[in-house]
Image (cartoon, grey):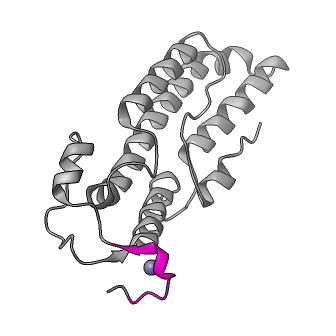
Amino acid sequence: MATCGHEESFIESPPSLEIMVKNYPLIALNEEIDRSTPRCRLCDLTAATSRESAAVYPPPTFSSRIEDLQHHIALAEQLIAEGIRKEELEATLASIQKMLTDEIFATGNRMLEAWKEHWAIWGLGEGPEMPNVYLEEVVEEESRAATGNKVKAPLNIKGKASAKKAKRF
Ligand SMILES: [Zn+2]
């Protein structure tokens, strides 16, 4: 029995392997745990959310590379608009936008990775969107980036990450 002090309502037995295989045929399952032993779902959720935060805001700086790149792009666009270092900045803008697109993709993958352990026990339903949905969004972002429009992170970031996700510009 869980001894974390959370409410009884969070403590339940994970779905059986049969149910997991039936409902979530595409995810890797945790076959190590004893599924007849109740455990605290809230503790598992908290751990997954914390891994996700670390994926988006990695130590030691705990800053988001996506936000940093968005900041660089906004600054460059502003300077270009003002005619400051215009040619030089225009020449580098596309490569920074490419870096942003790549980083959004990489961060999304790290976020999915952060949730795999939770999904392996409880199945899907919490955490980021399913990978196929996510990949569609990334393709959309890439095509938008190619047209030179502003790129925004497609990430469904929760908790602490959500508060920090707010665009600076
Ligand atoms: Zn707990």
Q: Residue at x 47, y 37 (%)?
A: 103
Residue 83 visible in the snapshot? no
Q: Residue furthest top?
A: 147
Assign the N terminus to one quadrant of the image.
bottom left
Q: Quadrant of ligand 1?
A: bottom left
Kindly give the residue lying farthest to the right in the view shown. Answer: 82
Q: Please provide the residue range marked out in magenta.
A: 3-12
Tell me, yes or no, whether the highlighted magenta stretch contains residue 131. Answer: no
Q: Nearer the viewer, residue 138 or 45?
A: 45
Q: Residue at x 67, y 53 (%)?
A: 164
* Relative height, residue 105 to residue 147 (above, below): below
Tally of numbered discs: 0
Nearer-the-camera pick, 95 or 53: 53
97 and 105: which is toward the camera: 105
Q: Is residue 79 left or right of residue 67?
A: right
Residue 147: percent from left, percent from top: 59, 9
Q: In terms of image quadrants, where is residue 108?
A: top left
Residue 85 at x, y = what percent? 74, 21
Point out residue 38 in the picture as x, y percentages from the top left corner: 30, 77
Taking the magenta stretch, the answer to whether it contains residue 5 is yes
The answer to which quarter of the image holds residue 66 is top right
